[in-house]
Image (cartoon, grey):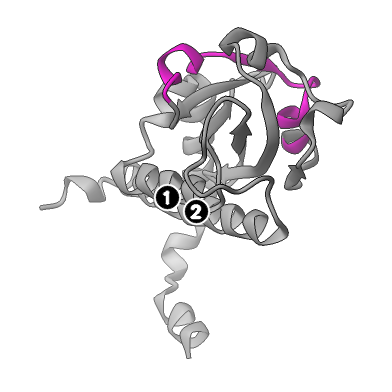
Amino acid sequence: MIGARTRLLRNAEFNRLGGDLIEHLESWISTGTPTDLIGLFDEVAISLLREAFAHVGGCEGTVWLADSEEKYLIASYNSGDDADSLIGFEQPIGSGIISMVFSQQQPYCENDIQASNGHDDTLDRKMSKHTTALLAVPLYFAFGLRGVISCVQLEEVENGVGKNGFSSADIEALALVSNVVERLVNETLLSSALGLSDVS
């Protein structure tokens, strides 16, 4: 029934505009910065992320957005106490687990992060903390891969639920929230691009 309703919503006159709209959005994103893009995440999206980080037993979570040249993943939002110091940190694409998740477009979970050869501890050293477990999923919006959502457990910080490590159910939960956030950001982008957000 839902599929039938979706087909009824289609309008042939709009079909040709789809490609133009995607091109317009891609052009805007390519000239913007991660700071511009994180502004698309409204209070509902941020609230969903924070709830998801807590639900899976994370001490904190981060939204990493790729720069326009896809050379770095930039920490653009963080839910932890050190967010002000962390935001703006640039993780080179090609180094570390977060970068691997972006490149391979696959979720990743590691519950013994110190033993992982792929772990880049630059951020840990910068923040004077030690990551013990990490969960990360790719983040899509505007018809493309735009970054990564990660969640960590830290040796120095209680996660509030007494949980050590992440499970496959936690991966699914964070991936689901990533999908919902994608839809929310897309709605914001499309409403703005089409002028629908100006309609009272």
Query: Which residue is painted at 43% across and 32% down in the image?
Result: 79
- The circle drawn on residue 133 is none
Q: Nearer the viewer, residue 146 or 44?
A: 44
Is residue 108 shown left or right of residue 61? right
Task: Specify whether residue 83 is painted magenta.
Answer: yes
For disc 2, the neighbor class at 10 Å (few under 14, some 14 to 19, many from 20) is some
Residue at 43% x, 61% y: name it. 14
Indicate whether residue 89 is drawn in magenta: yes
| Residue under pointer 2 | 55
On the image, the x and y values in percent for residue 90 come to 61, 14
**In this view, which residue lies farthest toward the bottom?**
1
User: Label 2 sits on what residue type?
Assistant: His
Label 2 element class: helix
Q: Quadrant of residue 152?
A: top right
Residue that sits furthest to the left in the current view: 200
Check if mark 2's residue and mark 1's residue have beta carbons within 8 Å. yes
- Give the residue type at disc 1: Glu
**Furthest-front residue in view?**
162
Q: Which residues are magenta?
A: 81-101
Q: Residue 150 versus residue 66: which sits nearer the camera?
A: 150
Residue pictured at 65% horizontal, 16% vertical: 124
Quickly name the residue at label 1: 51
